Image: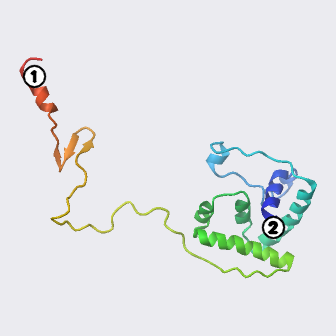
């Protein structure tokens, strides 16, 4: 219900935004160029029903309470709009498991305050994980007599030509051109 209500609040917009403090929290500015300039899939704006609008007004009060007490409204809005979890984790400089835990704790806080349910959610606070392994070697492998130094035969270096074992590879082209020059061709 919370996810759908945030989407409904976003679809409704606010005609009085200019009189308020930079708009409501659920009206998201698009910070991603791919989304802002249409490089991604287009979404269709929908017209919510009266029931959805009524539920969204209730959830708006919940979000206001959450923003004043626990924080995490931006996280819930991003979650409702199906923003990738890895991007949220990158923004908050934590792990993906931590983001899931924070979302669950925000929903649990709303349930406790407004629903009378006390859900115990384990608090997970982990540092961000490395997105990509390093592209360099931290230790130099030992050279043995049994292992070849290079697994590859020849390598093309622009401007030099083919190289093999640190030397320029002559594949016979220079001999052909030398013969042609010697015979006057």
Residue pointed to by mark 1 = 181
Indicate the secondary structure of the residue bearing disc 1: helix
Instruction: Please identify the quadrant where the C terminus is shown.
Output: top left
Residue pointed to by mark 2 = 63
Residue 169 pos. (x, y %): 17, 41
Q: Quadrant of residue 146?
A: bottom left
Proximity of marks 2 and 1: CB atoms separated by less than 8 Å:
no
Image position of 158 (left or right of 122): left
Residue in the picture at 13% in, 28% down = 176
Residue in the picture at 19% in, 65% down = 143
Mark 2 vs mark 1: which is more N-terminal?
2
Residue in the picture at 92% in, 58% down = 51
Residues under labels 2 and 1: Cα distance?
A: 83 Å
Image position of 154 (left or right of 21): left
Instruction: Please identify the quadrant where the N terminus is shown.
Output: bottom right
Residue 68 pos. (x, y %): 79, 72
Question: Is 137 above or below relative to 124?
Answer: above
Taking depth in this image into account, of 104 and 30 the one nearest to the observer is: 104
Question: Is 49 above or below relative to 185?
Answer: below
Indicate the secondary structure of the residue bearing disc 2: helix
Report if residue 50 is visible in the image: yes
Q: What colouring method underlies this structural image?
A: rainbow
Q: Quadrant of residue 91?
A: bottom right
Q: Residues within 10 Å of mark 2 (few under 14, many from 20)?
A: many
* Circle count: 2
């Amino acid at each position: 219900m919370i996810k759908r209500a945030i989407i409904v609040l976003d679809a409704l917009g606010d005609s009085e935004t200019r009189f308020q403090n930079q708009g409501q929290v659920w009206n998201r500015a698009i910070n991603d160029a791919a989304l802002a300039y249409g490089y991604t899939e287009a979404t269709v704006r929908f017209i919510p029903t009266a029931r959805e609008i009524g539920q969204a007004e209730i959830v708006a009060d919940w979000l206001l309470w959450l923003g004043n007490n626990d924080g995490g409204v931006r996280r819930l809005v991003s979650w409702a709009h199906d923003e990738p979890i890895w991007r949220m984790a990158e923004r908050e400089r934590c792990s993906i498991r931590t983001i899931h835990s924070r979302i669950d704790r925000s929903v649990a806080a709303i349930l406790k305050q407004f629903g009378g349910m006390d859900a115990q959610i384990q608090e997970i606070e982990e540092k961000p994980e490395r997105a990509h392994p390093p592209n360099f070697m931290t230790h130099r492998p030992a050279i043995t007599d049994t292992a070849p130094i290079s697994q590859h035969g020849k390598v093309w270096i622009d401007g030099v030509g083919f190289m093999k074992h640190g030397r320029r590879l002559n594949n016979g082209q220079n001999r052909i051109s030398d013969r042609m020059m010697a015979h006057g061709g």
